Amino acid sequence: MRPEAQGIAPAVGPFAKSEAWRTLRHLTNRSDMRLLSALKYRAGGFPFPQKSKRQTLAAFHYPLDYVPGWQQAYLPGGLIQFQAAVPKEEARETFQRQLEHCKKARLEPYLVVMKRHRPDPAFLPYLVDGYSLALDMHRIGEREEDLRRLYGEMAELVIEAGGRFHLTKDALLTPDQLSRSLPKPGLAQFRELKASVDPEGLITSAQNERLRIASTPKTMHIRL
């Protein structure tokens, strides 16, 4: 908990962490990621099985930051993250089905994070009384259409389970999928509020135009 304990060492021995992404880039493929996952899993019980262990808050919440510039390991295509929250009663089955779809498509996520959540009273709530699963998907040029199809399949599983989507991480959701996932009263309230403060629809965003969350501009606009 001490602030001074939250830092990240700039190097591992003589090796600068700022260059680690170059090595990771060569490992960003299905076979090497399978090996890394197995090693990580077995490392949890080394040198002997442990029921629990201590970590700093920084290490627990930001594991990727231990590799500065980790995003570059996904070049040249980059990555797409799919993250949705599902009610606790449906989470286990839904997440299992999502991963089965990934395996069938041979587009397994290279990083998976699950979190526990409580309900959110916001107009456009993402959180439910349940769990979220974040899946980091590698964008590979020749598999782009397959990835989009997989994204849509997983989105339908979430909607079927009464789940919701993390819009700040979304890239491929459709207007229909968003509309079916959000509570209708909250969406209506948000649109009424937006219309009251921006009656001419001047303020918008690329995501708003794609998902039609609120009214779209008629002429000129300010895109955020």
Image (tube, rainbow, N blue to C red):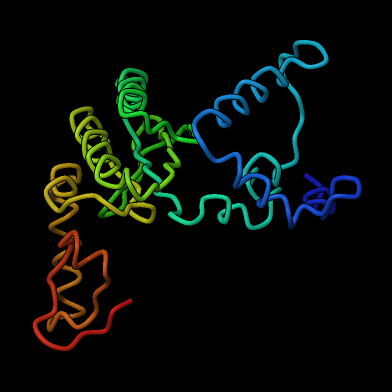
Q: How many marks?
A: 0
22 vs 160: above or below: below
The residue shown at (34%, 39%) is: 84
62 vs 135: above or below: below
Residue sitting at the far top: 49
Residue 4 position in % (x across, y down)? 84, 53
The residue shown at (73%, 55%) is: 19
Residue 14 position in % (x across, y down)? 91, 50
Residue 190 position in % (x across, y down)? 20, 62
Image quadrant containing the N terminus: top right
Left or right of 151 in this view: 198: left
- Specify the quadrant of the image occupied by residue 103: top left
The residue shown at (75%, 41%) is: 56
- Specify the quadrant of the image occupied by residue 51: top right
Left or right of 177 in this view: 172: right
Residue 203 position in % (x across, y down)? 24, 79
Residue sitting at the far left: 218
Residue sitting at the far front: 142
The residue shown at (32%, 31%) is: 86
Image quadrant containing the C terminus: bottom left
Left or right of 45 in this view: 93: left
- Specify the quadrant of the image occupied by residue 133: top left
- Between 153 and 90, the one nearer to me in the picture: 153
- Between 124 and 152, the one nearer to me in the picture: 152
Residue sitting at the far bottom: 220
- Between 157 and 5, the one nearer to me in the picture: 157
